[in-house]
Image (spheres, rainbow, N blue to C red):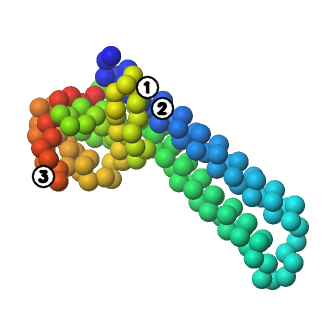
Amino acid sequence: MELHEIKARLLAKCINQQLEVIRQLHQEIEEAQKQANDYGQPKDRYDAFRTKLMRQIEMFAKQLDKANIVINTLQKINIDKKLTKVEFGALVITNKQKLFVSAGLGKMDIDGEEYFAISPLVPVFVALKGKMKDDKADFNGTAFIIEDVS
């Protein structure tokens, strides 16, 4: 399979994964809000149950903000742009791993092959940044050889 097609599938998988996270967070917020509404007004100013529900809603809202930032970041990737060096949006094939520089979403499977969606903030990206096909890089004592970049 062509690298461009793999990259498109990886991006779609990342976006779909984030959309599912966002959907679940909306559900959690709605459920906690429903519980708070069903519970009614605070029983006193130290109402622990209602305070717990409000903290849950606040926590889920913060997670939702982060998930929305990730989805916005992913949507900035132009898969049609041909990349020749390791940078944001690149699919990087090394002798050790296959990396998609996008967002830190972890291991992805495409047709039985393992790819890792990584953030441009992780140390392995910093070690590979700007490198091109056939370049070498060291990371944590491991030698990486870049076999391809797309």
Q: Is residue 85 left or right of residue 7?
A: left
Quarter of the image for residue 1 reads top left
Q: Residue furthest front?
A: 112
- Tag 1 secondary structure: helix
Q: Nearer the viewer, residue 144 or 80?
A: 144
Q: Which residue is mark 3?
A: 141
Q: Is residue 54 left or right of residue 133?
A: right
The amino acid sitting under disc 1 is: Arg
Residue at the spot 12% in from the left edge and 52% down from the top edge: 141
Quarter of the image for residue 11 reads top left
Q: Earlier in the sequence, mark 1 or mark 3?
A: 1
Quarter of the image for residue 109 reads top left
> Disc 1 vs disc 3: which is toward the camera?
3
Whole-angstrom CA distance, mark 1 to mark 2, is: 6 Å
Residue 9 marker = 1
Q: Dot 2: within a 10 Å radius of its alpha carbon, few (fewer than 14), some, or many (20 or more) residues? A: some
- Tag 3 secondary structure: loop
Circle 3/circle 2 CB separation < 8 Å = no
Q: Is residue 9 left or right of residue 146?
A: right
Residue at the spot 87% in from the left edge and 78% down from the top edge: 43
Q: Nearer the viewer, residue 139 or 65?
A: 139
Residue 30: image x %, image y %? 75, 52
Q: Earlier in the sequence, mark 3 or mark 2?
A: 2
Residue 102 visible in the picture: no
Q: Dot 3: within a 10 Å radius of its alpha carbon, few (fewer than 14), some, or many (20 or more) residues? A: few
- Tag 2 secondary structure: helix
> Disc 3 vs disc 2: which is toward the camera?
3
Q: Which residue is mark 2?
A: 13
Circle 1/circle 2 CB separation < 8 Å = yes
The amino acid sitting under disc 3 is: Gly
Residue at the spot 53% in from the left edge and 41% down from the top edge: 18
